[in-house]
Amino acid sequence: MFKDNGIQYASPFVNMAEPEMVPKQMYDCLKDVFDIDMAVWLQYLPIDDDLLGWLFGEETQAKKIRSPLDISDVWTSSNSSNTNEILWGAKFATRFPWITCVLRLSSYECGMDQPTYTPTQKIVEATGTLFFKFGDLDSTKPAGSIRIRIETIVHYLAKYL
């Protein structure tokens, strides 16, 4: 169904507990999706010690979190790598000054990721970062609903920027 609609599906599995492995794991899954090589890819992943120290340094020094990849301050039951990535991504996005909007894409709202919807939205919106959620993407919804969502995002981004 994805292919028939011109959508390429990718679902990387990464081990956030071993940050040195994350770039390769992400690259291996996404290299064909984004048509990138490893040298371009590495510059965009947020695993550089200097960058993570800049974004999370105050919290690690104050011992609010154990490391820049720690999510225990926002999520205590770390049972799923996908859930961990979602929540850490929200934390990263709210601290990175050039990110003004977070889009949450999902094909359905059940399963292990379902409990992360409200915490993710709260993490993002608490800092004034815009948050939009596209749910039920695999449902048989009219194309007009997607168009309205995109127009809404464009409106708020123009207002915010």
Image (cartoon, rainbow, N blue to C red):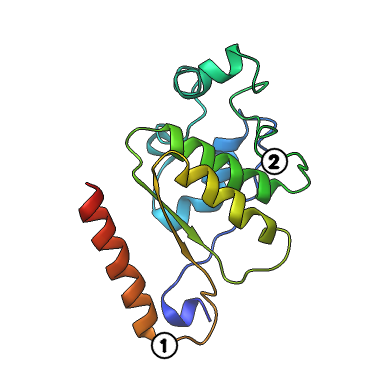
Out of 156 and 57, give the one closest to the viewer: 156
Is residue 55 at least partly visible in the picture? yes
**Residue occupying image coordinates x 33% and y 44%:** 100
Near mark 2 (Cα within 10 A), the count class, few <14, some 14-19 or many ≥20, is some
Give percent across and percent down for residue 22. 59, 36
Mark 2 in CB contact with mark 1 (< 8 angstroms):
no
Give percent across and percent down for residue 47. 52, 28
Which numbered tag is attached to residue 75? 2
Left or right of 126? Residue 117 is right
**Residue occupying image coordinates x 48% and y 45%:** 124
Q: Secondary structure at mark 1?
A: loop
Which numbered tag is attached to residue 60? none
**Residue occupying image coordinates x 55% and y 65%:** 106
Compared with 7, 26 (above or below) is: above
The quadrant in which residue 73 appears is top right
Near mark 1 (Cα within 10 A), the count class, few <14, some 14-19 or many ≥20, is few
Q: Which residue is mark 1?
A: 142
**Residue occupying image coordinates x 41% and y 76%:** 6
Out of 83 and 39, give the one closest to the viewer: 83
Is residue 42 at least partly visible in the picture? no
Q: Earlier in the sequence, mark 2 or mark 1?
A: 2
Give percent across and percent down for residue 62. 60, 13
